[in-house]
Amino acid sequence: MTGVKKRISRRMFVSGSASLLGLAVSGCTTSNVRVANPVSPRKMAIPQSYVAAYGPMPQERFPVPAVDLNKVPEKFWRRQVAFETTYPVGTIIVNTNTFFLHLVQEQGTAMRYGVGLGRAGFAWSGEGRIAWKQEWPKWTPPAEMIAREPELEKWSAANGGMPPGLSNPLGARALYIFQGNVDTLYRIHGTAEFWSIGKAVSSGCVRLMNQDVIDLYDRVPERSTLIVI
C-alpha cells in the first residue's frame, strides 16, 4: 500500500447531492447478463466457523439464505488478516486487482472480504468517504440507465424506486460514497449472487455477499474514509 491518495475523477460525479431519504440514484445494478452459477464438481469440508458465519439469517427483515461456500473460492471468505498500512483504523481499502476489501483494524490487522466488481468498480481510483449507510435500501436507476434500458422506468425516482429485498441490486446493506457533498454514485453493497465474488461482473460497483456486507455495515461508522486502488 502507498500513502499517496488520488482524487476521484470528476467525470464520475453528478451535480448536487443525493437525497438521504432512501431513493438515492445509483449506477449500481445487476445487468441482464448474469454471471453463471457454477456447479461445484465436489463438496469440500467447510469449517464450522464458516458454516455459521455464512449460514441463514432469518432475523433479517428479508430472511437471508445460507451461502453455498463450495461456490466461493476459500480466499474470498471473510477473515482477519495481518495488514500493515499508514491509513488509520476504520479506513476501507478496496484493491481492484485482488478483489479484496480490507477494513483497517488495530495492531496491524484488517478484516478482509472478497468482492465482485463491475464496470463502475473499475472506473476510478482515489479517495472518498462514507456519507451514510442504509439497511435494505431502495434502488433507483439513473435517467441515463433508463434511457438504455426502458424496462427500468418502473423503478425510476418518479415511481418510487425498486423496493428493498433479496432481488434488489443493492442487497441487504449499502454504503454510499461521497467526495465532499457530491455523490460519486459509487456504492459498496450486498448481493445474493455469491458465486460472483472474485469476478468482474457485468455491471455494478463493489458487491459483497449479503452476510459480509451486513458484517461490514456493523463495523464501519459513517464518515469513514474509502480508498480504491
Image: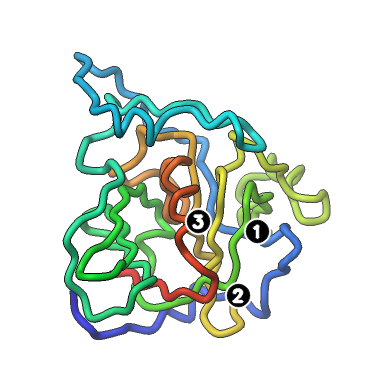
Secondary element type, mark 1? loop
Looking at the image, which residue is at 21% across and 75% down? 85
Label 3 belongs to which residue? Answer: 217
The amino acid beneath tag 3 is: Tyr
Q: Are marks 3 and 2 in contact (CB under 8 Å)?
A: no
Label 2 belongs to which residue? Answer: 14
Label 1 packing within 10 angstroms: few (<14), some (14-19), many (20+): some
Label 2 packing within 10 angstroms: few (<14), some (14-19), many (20+): few
**Foreground: disc 3 or disc 2:** 3
Looking at the image, which residue is at 31% across and 67% down? 104
So how many labels did they put on this image?
3
The amino acid beneath tag 1 is: Pro
The earlier-in-sequence mark between 3 and 1 is 1
Residue 188 location (% of width, % of height): 47, 57
Q: Are marks 1 and 2 in contact (CB under 8 Å)?
A: yes
Frontmost residue, 20 versus 16: 20
Looking at the image, which residue is at 67% across and 80% down? 16
Label 1 belongs to which residue? Answer: 142
Residue 66 location (% of width, % of height): 44, 26
